[in-house]
Structure formats: C-alpha cells, structure tokens
Amino acid sequence: MKPTLLDCTLRDGGNQNDWQFTATDVHTIVSTLDAARVDVIEVGYRGGSGSKSSATAGPSAHCTPEYLAALPAVSHAELAVMVVPTVCPVTAMDDLPDSPVSLVRIAAYPWNIDGVPEYVRAVRALGLKVGVNLMAVSYTTLEQLAEVAAVVAGEAPDVFYIADSFGALTPDDVRRRIELLAERLPTPLGIHAHNNLGLAAANAVAGLDAGVSWLDASLCAMARGAGNLATEQAAAFLTAWPKYDTHADLPLVCEAAEYVAEQVLPRPMTVRRAEIAAGINDHHFYFQDRIEKISARHGLDPWEVGRRIGAARPRKVLDETVEDVCRELAGQTEHTNGGDA
C-alpha cells in the first residue's frame, strides 16, 4: 500500500506563526518537499482561516494570485489550497485554474456540511481536483457521520478526510469512523490527526489499517496546539514498515523539518497541560487560555470547566461560553455547600 502523503505546514502551521512565512521559507519548504517526492504540498488557505482571524496574517493565510504565482516550480508534488466556505465565497476560487494549484480542499464542520456540495461542484467546474475535510469529527456520533456521508456521497470528491481537530480521538474511534465511511463513500479517505493525546501517529496507522489512503502531516508537527502528525515521522514509518510504501525521500524530508525547526518555528512544538486538557476534554484548543483565566476568576477547577465545555459541543470559541459554564458550575457548588451546612 502506498498512501498519499500531504504536507500542510504552510497552511496549518500558520496557526503557530500567524502565517508569517517569508518568501525564503515558502521557497525552501516547497522546493525541498518536492525534491523529497512528497505527494501533495498544501500552500495555504484561499480566503482566510475559519478559526483564527488576524489582520496581520501572512500570505499563506490568503493565497492571493500573486502569492501563488511566486511559488517555485514543482516536478513531483501537486500543490493544494484549502477553502473554508464560511469565510471564502465560492467566486473567490475563479482564478485558481490560472495558478499552479491542482487540488482544492473544502473544509467544513458537521453543522455546515450542507454548503459543501456547491463548492465541490464549483471546483470541479474549474477543472481542478477537489477534496472535502470534515472538521471536528470527534463531535459526531456514528449516526451523524453517516448523515454527513449521505450529503457528500453524490458529489464523489477525489478524497474525503476526517479531521480530529481537537486531538480527542483514539485509534478505536478512528477505526470505527473510517470503517463506516468506507461503506458509504465511493471515494478515497484521508485522516488529519492532532497530537493532543500523543496519538497522532497511532491514529494515522489505525486509519490506514481501516481503509485510509491519504495522510495529512506537517513538518515538525507545526500546527495549532499540540500539532499534527509530523511529516518526517510519517515518512519514517511509511519507509520502515514493510506493509507500506512511499515515494518520499526520508533524508530530504528530514532536511525540510530541520529548516522549519531552526528557521521557522517561533518555539518548539510541545504537548503540555493545555494541549492535553483540550484533547481529553474534546474542545477547541483556543478555548484553553480562556478556561484557565475565567475559571481562576471564579475559583473553579479548569479541568471540570473544560470537561463541561467539551460535552456542550460549542460551535464557536467565545468567552461567554466559558462564563456561562462557570456560572452554572459555581451555582451548583453553592447549592451543594448550602445543602451540607
């Protein structure tokens, strides 16, 4: 089995440095990964990220025609961009056929998946390949995931990904979801794993064993929070494990990772309390700082506050959400203490 390896450093890695990749960074990452025969290089978002708006975001947060035209020529890899329909109108993709991009990935949450077919058809009409990334897949039951599959099945995208956006899934969770999708979708499947619980590689392997043929990864795991499956680690286990095969030149992939570690990352990727808490409680990492500050102000346990936020499945990261949970929890605590008096 020869999985398709997609590197998303320039897209997802921007959550670490506000997409402030220099022209040299972009050229080095793309050229080295292409020389390493990585299959797909995702060079950023078209039209902005849906989860982190920033007035100072760098070029790969928008992938303007000028940015795409300046990309180095590639001889092996395909180039891709990601589109989030809630921030990028469908007409904003019209110039992409004149760019070096050949794959557009449409990213959506389970609650706005109904808008995806329009985008899939629009990308197809432009003569480009199209993928669908289902974000926050940990928020779906198997029944809900089947409903998502029913919406997408008729469009038959070139690849359908599950994204463990909050790093909450275990290998068993991945296996069940991929097996369900393999029965319902006539399309290759992929997985985008986050490492909050230290399971990014294990979840990728579980996905491969269950039917995945596309893997997302980023150099040095560069991404939001605990980061993704590291591209260099993915290339390593695909190279070392006889049941898999890969085009990737491992020494060159490691060379690209060393460049990112030394020249790009503002700080080393770590998995500490904040990252683990977001994963175990199954909520967006951008909640965690709010949880720590607001729960401290209320004198509450941030782990319990985080658990309740994850259980509520909030659709947006808002201070108000944390305040509401804290007020509810504080009220319950007062009631319990009063009853014991």
Image (cartoon, rainbow, N blue to C red):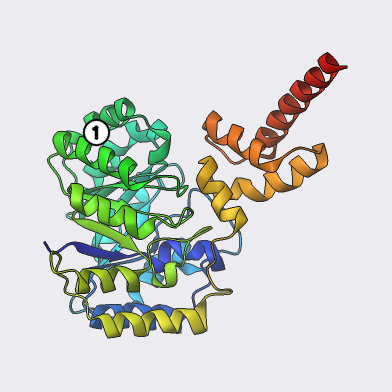
Is the residue 85 above or below the residue 150 in the image? below
Up-down relation of residue 196 to residue 41 (above or below)? above
Q: Which residue is mark 1?
A: 149
Q: How far from the left and from the top, in percent, is residue 87?
A: 46, 46
Q: Is residue 167 left or right of residue 201?
A: right
The image shows residue 249 at horizontal and vertical percentages of 22, 81
**Few, some or many C-alpha atoms within 10 Å of disc 1 (few <14, some 14-19, many ≥20)?**
many
Of all residues, the one furthest to the right in this rendering is 341
Give x and y (percent) for residue 313.
Answer: 51, 32
Q: Nearer the viewer, residue 325 or 32?
A: 325
Q: Residue at x 22, y 29 (%)?
A: 150
112 horizontally vs 245: left or right = right
Looking at this view, is 295 or 9 the one in front?
A: 295
Quarter of the image with the N terminus is bottom left
Q: Amino acid at mark 1?
A: Ala
Measured as percent of width and height from the top left, residue 146 is found at 26, 29
Q: Does dot 1 land on a helix, a strand or a loop?
A: helix
* Res. 125 in view: no
Left/right of residue 44 with respect to residue 151 in the rendered view: right
Label total for image: 1
Residue shown at 72%/34% (left/top)? 323
Residue at the front extreme, as displayed: 340
**In front of the other: 34 or 219:** 219
- Quarter residue 144 falls in: top left
Quarter of the picture holding the C terminus: top right
Q: Nearer the viewer, residue 144 or 91?
A: 144
* Identity of the residue drawn at 29% across and 42% down: 119
Quadrant of the rendered structure where residue 138 is? top left
Q: Is residue 82 visible?
A: yes
